[in-house]
Image: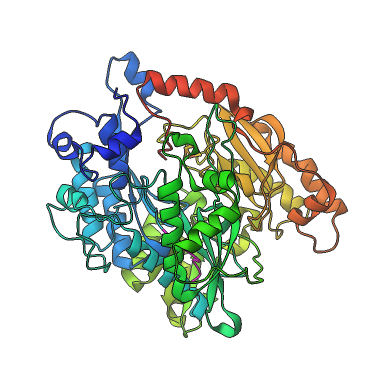
């Protein structure tokens, strides 16, 4: 195993090339550490099937290696043809499922090494890319997912595309390796294929970097959990500018007490003309001052925390022509998606489809893939992926609504009107079997957990209350559990830490309520909290507000709450020659 740091690997990689081509051409089963790190920038993680690990080890076999490939889709917007390309690829090259990510992208799992090049090439040939979907660069930029034809929503999507274009890495490595040297056709800047990279240099950023754009009153992108959060200011229906928040992020690391989840802090307000400039000023501040000596403390949130928001604002301002002004008064409400049917505002309709845990697959009970394929082929809708891992069918003619409803219901896809509001908002991370870091199940058990909670909510007449439940398979918190009303974070097989006290608006962090609860106990553990709320709340009072009025949060989430489990995981990964990086 290489002992090189990620910073050294980047530096020696010749702009993210390393030995990727050589390894692809060779007959080895998997990539070594340096290329494993570099592959992330190209949009893929090397994984192995953890369900098969022990069995294969006993049989003296190598791990069952495969790859997850992530499409980068700014604002989660794709065409019907791009959707159908992913759908076909799920059968041709992957494990017959598609996973909507928490950043409005798609992941396909189970790609074999021999198919990796074809998979990435297919995505690029459809007009999308995987370049920069992972790695120490700006990840997929999110924007409010509702396809409403108003100035704010249209502008949020445009801004996401502008930021994406301005932050795509410039190295030719990607096109050389995956596209046989073809130029990327992404409608991005004309300089996209120039090797020199004035934004990233040769070391790229100290860590991953996440940007989201919200349109009030909805916080469907979970804006405060991002490195940069933009919130649209559009008085009288005209976009004038954006409030900007900086330094959010939820990951934490064993043995590093300073690592913990943070919500972002207010930087200020910037007029629309200066939004991309502001994003670049923030990114380059992190590039130049972020911690490259200690990777666990390298996210922007630690720079903002250690230097203070005043210092950070002054530094960003010094890199801009536009002014960072005091925040505008903008209020956000819940993080939910607009599910079901809604008018777009241009004579057409959109239909938000609830996708259980973001997994598009066919089972005996529900056939998401068949239904969505049929709808995409027949009606050619534009599609938006949401940060809550749902999917929106856009640009539907009024006359086609009934036929689309019929296809959805024929394939067992729930009418969101029949779900509890908690279920419509709830989400779990991927975890087992593909995530090398998971300590407990998440995606595969969450529907059952929510069935139990749903029954209690209905019994207590709380079915329409926006109570945000989330689950993660480990403290990394990919499903954003640390600002939910109630969340469960895996600490071992069937064991979870129980957190409570965040907010369905995504603007408050949880506290630890109970160190360990068993999977089967979760609905029973939640019941007394819901009963007290149902009994003692004021009329129309939300659970988040009831909690804030009547309770004090427990200890803030910290790595020490998972001390033993994280230590054991670190040992396990070291024995396996792996580094502790999320690889969902
Ligand atoms: Fe879930 Fe992310 Fe942890 Fe994997 S790293 S178990 S996807 S929270």
Q: Which residues are magenta?
A: 141-146
Image quadrant for the C terminus?
A: top left
Report x, y in % for residue 210: 46, 53
Residue 145, magenta (yes or no): yes
Report x, y in % for residue 469: 63, 48
Q: At 30% across and 15% down in the image, what residue appears?
A: 59
Left or right, 221 with reference to 515: left
* Nearer the observer, 395 or 18: 18
Residue 165, magenta (yes or no): no
* Nearer the observer, 581 or 472: 581
**Number of numbered discs overlaid on the protein picture:** 0
Q: Report if residue 362 is visible in the image.
A: no
Left or right, 498 with reference to 17: right
Q: At 52% across and 22% down in the image, what residue appears?
A: 567
Report x, y in % for residue 365: 48, 49
Vertical order, 435 against 422 (above or below): above
Report x, y in % for residue 325: 58, 70
Q: At 80% across and 44% down in the image, what residue appears?
A: 552
Vertical order, 533 against 474 (above or below): below
Image quadrant for the N terminus?
A: top left
- The secondary structure that dominates the magenta segment is loop
Q: At 39% across and 18% down in the image, what residue appears?
A: 575
């Amino acid at each position: 195993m290489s002992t090189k740091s990620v910073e050294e690997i980047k530096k020696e990689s010749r702009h993210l090339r390393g030995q990727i081509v050589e390894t692809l051409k060779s007959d080895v089963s998997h990539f070594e550490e340096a290329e494993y790190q570099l592959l992330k920038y190209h949009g893929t993680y090397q994984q192995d099937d953890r369900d098969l690990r022990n069995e294969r080890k006993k049989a003296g076999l190598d791990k069952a290696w495969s790859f997850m490939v992530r499409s980068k889709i700014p604002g989660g917007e794709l065409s019907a043809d791009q959707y159908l390309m992913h759908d076909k690829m799920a059968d041709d090259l992957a494990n017959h499922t598609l996973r909507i990510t928490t950043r409005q992208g798609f992941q396909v799992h189970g790609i074999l090494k021999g198919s990796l090049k074809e998979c990435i090439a297919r995505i690029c040939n459809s007009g999308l890319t995987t370049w920069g979907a992972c790695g120490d660069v700006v990840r997929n930029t999110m924007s409010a997912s509702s396809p409403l034809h108003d100035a704010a929503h249209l502008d949020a999507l445009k801004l996401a595309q502008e930021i994406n274009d301005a932050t795509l890495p410039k190295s030719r490595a990607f096109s050389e390796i995956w596209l046989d040297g073809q130029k990327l056709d992404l409608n991005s800047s004309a300089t996209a294929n120039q090797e020199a990279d004035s934004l990233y240099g040769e070391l790229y950023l100290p860590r991953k970097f996440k940007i989201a754009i919200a349109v009030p009153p909805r916080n469907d992108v979970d804006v405060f959990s991002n490195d940069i959060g933009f919130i649209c200011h559009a008085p009288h229906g005209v976009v004038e500018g954006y409030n900007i928040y900086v330094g959010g992020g939820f990951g934490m690391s064993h043995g590093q007490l300073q690592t913990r989840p943070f919500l972002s802090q207010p930087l200020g307000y910037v007029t629309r003309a200066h939004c991309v400039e502001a994003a670049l000023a923030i990114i380059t501040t992190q590039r130049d001052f972020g911690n490259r000596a200690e990777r666990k403390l390298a996210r922007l949130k630690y720079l903002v925390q250690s230097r203070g928001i005043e210092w950070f604002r002054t530094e960003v301002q010094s890199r801009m022509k536009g002014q960072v002004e005091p925040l505008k008064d903008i209020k956000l409400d819940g993080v939910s998606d607009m599910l079901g049917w809604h008018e777009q505002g241009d004579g057409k309709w959109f239909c938000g489809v609830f996708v259980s845990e973001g997994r598009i697959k066919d089972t005996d009970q529900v056939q998401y893939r068949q239904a969505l394929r049929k709808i995409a082929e027949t009606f050619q809708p534009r599609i938006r992926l949401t940060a809550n891992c749902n999917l929106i069918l856009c640009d539907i003619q009024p006359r086609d609504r009934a036929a689309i409803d019929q296809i959805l219901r024929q394939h067992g896809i729930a009418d969101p009107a029949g779900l509890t509001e908690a279920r419509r908002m709830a989400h779990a991370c991927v975890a087992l079997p593909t995530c090398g870091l998971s300590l407990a199940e998440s995606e595969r058990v969450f529907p059952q957990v929510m069935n139990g909670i749903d029954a209690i909510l209905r019994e207590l007449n709380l079915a329409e209350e926006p109570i945000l439940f989330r689950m993660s398979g480990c403290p990394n918190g990919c499903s954003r559990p640390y600002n939910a009303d109630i969340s469960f974070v895996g600490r071992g097989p069937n064991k979870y830490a129980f957190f409570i006290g965040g907010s369905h608006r995504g603007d408050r962090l949880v506290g630890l309520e109970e160190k360990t609860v068993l999977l089967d106990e979760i609905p029973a553990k939640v019941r007394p909290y819901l009963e007290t709320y149902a009994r003692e709340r004021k009329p129309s009072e939300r659970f988040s507000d009831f909690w804030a009025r009547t309770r004090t949060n427990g200890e803030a989430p910290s790595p020490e709450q998972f001390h033993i489990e994280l230590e054991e995981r670190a040992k396990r990964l070291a024995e396996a020659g792996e580094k502790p990086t999320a690889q969902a």
